[in-house]
Image (cartoon, grey):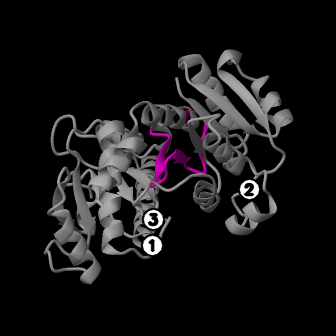
Amino acid sequence: MPTIAVDAMGGDFAPEEVVKGVAQASLETDIQCTLVGDEAQIQAALDRVPYNPEHIAVHHTPDFISMEDDPKRGLRQKRNASVLVAARLVSEGQADAVVTAGNTGAAVLACAQQFRTIPGVQKAALASVYPRQTEYPGQDQLALLLDVGATIRCEATELVQFALMGSAYARHISKVPSPRIALLNMGVEETKGGDILVSAHRRLKTVGGVNFVGNIEGNDLAKGKADVIVCEGFLGNVVLKLLEGLAEVVVDLAGTARRENWRWKLGFFVLANSFGRLRDLTDYTAYGGAPILGFEHLMIKSHGRSNARAINNAIKVAAKAVRDGVTREIAAAIERL
């Protein structure tokens, strides 16, 4: 059973919610977890919840990177920050993967400092999942978008590698036998988007083992046309924040209308199942987190506002990825390319 190093001090509600999530995982699974952070705070949080001590270890370190800290400066000044120590445990063979809800920049830099890049990979990618419509039975309700922030600009080769990494991850985690891969572009035509996207499109059409469906536009993101959407990190981050904001607005508007007008209240009652489904789809706690891909080891980055349920699910995702050999499959795909 994999051992997951969990950054106990990362996230808006750390360490309380992180520790609670690990405690839940210890009761529900056989996954071994190592909580990395201030031992006194971790133990105090553990004492307030039921847990299985056989599945939890604590690795003390006094420092952590806050959500407001500058990632580079923080890691340079705090060599024993919890996210860095958690990654170090993996690189030294004491754990198999990392889960953190902390500072995203620090998480990516910790991977770069402690993990070796998969041979041939030019740039790592931060992935994220988001809810969308489905077009066929059994299709995952969550699509994978990458990169969403580890890069700013990319070359065509790097976008092709993102597609291979995302395809391997979706096959194992989403259990999609042949994930549909698409490039996010300003049009569906092969000639749209400039030289880099045109070149990436041309190359993806010829790569074996990749179910490439071409370009998709922004209005296709919420549909089930693709399972993995590839783009540069700058664009991906903007898209991700827009999707999160729209989901929150829709849910808030529905709640406000229900409270202020009896006609809306009646309509909300009629559409209650649909709104409930929307709320469930946009509940990031259900999927836990998404990976930083391109390294020989895996880190699952959870939402900064993650609660215990989200951390619990992130641990399960990390363990599944380790058991299924996701990084090995990515390495094999890059080698074939």
- Secondary structure under the numbered disc 2 in the rendered image: loop
Percent position of residue 277, x then y: 34, 39
- Label 1 vs label 3: CA separation? 14 Å
Q: Answer with mark 2 or mark 1, whichever residue precedes in sequence.
A: 2
Q: Note whether 163 is above or below 98 in the view shown.
A: below
| Secondary element at image label 3 | loop
Which numbered marker is on residue 48? none
Give the residues drawn in magenta, as a range: 287-309
Q: Nearer the viewer, mark 1 or mark 3?
A: 3
Please tell me which residue is depicted at 69% across the width and 67% down the height of the picture.
Answer: 72
Question: Which amino acid, mark 2?
Answer: Ile
208 or 10, nearer to the observer = 208
Amino acid, disc 1: Phe
Which residue is nearer to you in this view: 85 or 179?
A: 85
What residue is disc 2 on? 65
Q: Residues within 10 Å of mark 2 (few under 14, many from 20)?
A: many
